[in-house]
Each structure stands twice: as C-alpha cells, then as structure tokens.
Image (tube, rainbow, N blue to C red):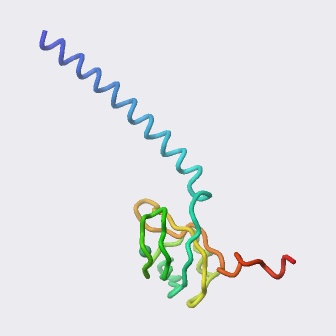
Amino acid sequence: MLLKLSAALILLLALNGTAVADSAHHAGAAKLAGTEANLPLIDGEVKKVDKDTGKLTIKHGPITNLGMPAMTMVFRVNDPAMLDKVKSGDKIRFAADKVSGVLTVMRVEPASAAGGNPQAE
Ligand SMILES: [Cu+2]
C-alpha cells in the first residue's frame, strides 16, 4: 500500500516536472522573440569606449526594464560595431538588457536622432 502510494507520488512529480519545464521553455522562447523591440530607450552619455574588451562605460538615466537607478557603469555591447558608432562624450539613447547574466547594450543611437534628422527633411 505504501509502496503503491510512493509510486503514484513519483509519477505525479514526474508529470508535474515535465509540465513545468515545458511551460518555462515556451515562456523563454516568447521572451526572446519580443525582447529587443520592447526595451525602452534610455538617455545616456558615453564616458569610455573600450574596443579591446568590447565594453562601453555609460553615464545613464534610470533603466526601468532592469530596475536600475541612474549611475555610471560599464556595459558589454551586443554588437562590436556599436563601438565604432559612438565616442567618449557622445549623448546617446540606448536599450540595455541582461544577456546570460551580463548587462548588455542591445542598441544605441545618437540622442539627437530623436529630435529629427536634418538629412531626412
Ligand atoms: Cu547602471
């Protein structure tokens, strides 16, 4: 009787575990698909460009999607080409997210682009 009960319990746990793993998998896939487009653009100022390590030091405003207050800190960049687009002292707007636990700049644009591009008119 006891043996039968534990067998049933184990079966239940196994089924449960499968369900949890499955839903986690789907949630992860959905997050990946929509992540970058949904990230808010943060105001920042480039303090340092480090092409050797692929990192940017940015003085940034609050990053709401990461729950981070304004500060100056180092970010990894998602694409090394970003390091050629900015230089120290540039005012930028950027999106940041955690990629494998590392704070990463996902996209960056000059702050002036938001106010209208003269070339587009
Ligand atoms: Cu920060």
* Relative vertical location of residue 108 with respect to residue 100 in this rendering, above or below: below
* Relative vertical location of residue 58 with respect to residue 98 in this rendering, above or below: below
Residue at the right extreme, as displayed: 121
> Residue 102 at x, y = what percent?
42, 66
> Residue 11 at x, y = what percent?
28, 20
Left or right of residue 33, residue 8 in this image:
left
Left or right of residue 85, residue 26 in this image:
left
Q: Nearer the viewer, residue 38 or 107?
A: 38
Residue that appears at 82% across and 82% down:
118
> Residue 84 at x, y = what percent?
63, 81
Residue that appears at 47% across and 72% down:
62
Residue that appears at 53% across and 72% down:
77
Residue at the left extreme, as displayed: 2
> Residue 114 at x, y = what percent?
70, 75
Q: Quadrant of ligand 1?
A: bottom left
Residue that appears at 50% across and 87% down:
48
- How many discs appear? 0
